[in-house]
Image: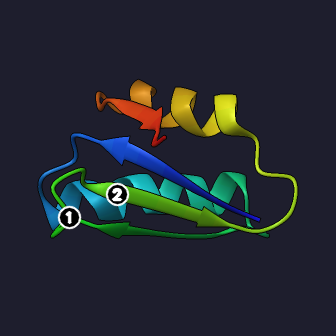
Amino acid sequence: MVEVFKTNVQKKAESKMILSTLNETFPSLKVNFDLDDPDKILRVEGHDIKLKEIIHLTNSKGFECEILK
């Protein structure tokens, strides 16, 4: 399963901080950013993706995050 989120992350350092947190919290998931995309995409791949928790963790770091429809 793959989920794609729209964020407002702008800098590579910011994305690394969020990826580190997500990797620690959800080690079985593959996560990455596409900061070249206008929607600053956060892509999450794996089984049992906890959408609300991913959004909450990203928000807790001071960034917007919503499921891209």
Task: Left or right? Give the position of 46 relative to 14.
Answer: right
Residue 69 image point, x, y percent? 49, 40
Query: Is 67 left or right of 54, judged from the image as shown?
Result: left
For this orientation, the residue located farthest to the front is 69
Amino acid type assigned to the residue bearing label 2 in the image: Ile
Q: Report which residue position mark 1 lands on.
A: 37
**Identity of the residue drawn at 41% across and 27% down:** 59
Mark 1 neighbour class, 10 Å CA radius: few under 14, some 14 to 19, many 20 or more: few
Residue occupying the point 40% across, 34% down: 65
Which residue is more in the foreground, 10 or 60? Answer: 10
Location of residue 67 with respect to 5 vertically, above or below: above
Distance of label 1 from label 2 (alpha carbons)? 6 Å
Is there CB contact under 8 Å for labels 1 and 2? yes
Q: Nearer the viewer, residue 48 or 39?
A: 39
User: What kind of element bears circle 2?
Assistant: strand
Corner quadrant of residue 28: bottom right
User: Is residue 14 rendered to the left or right of residue 48?
Assistant: left
Tell me the amino acid under the disc marked 1. Asp
The quarter of the rendered structure image containing the N terminus is: bottom right
- Tell me if residue 69 comes above or below residue 43 in the rendering: above
Residue 32 in the image, given as x and y percentages of width and height: 45, 70
Q: Which residue is more in the foreground, 33 or 13?
A: 33
Q: Residues within 10 Å of mark 2 (few under 14, many from 20)?
A: many
Q: x and y percent of residue 44 in the render?
A: 59, 62
Q: Which residue is mark 2?
A: 41
Element type at marker 1?
Answer: loop
x, y percent for residue 31 = 55, 68
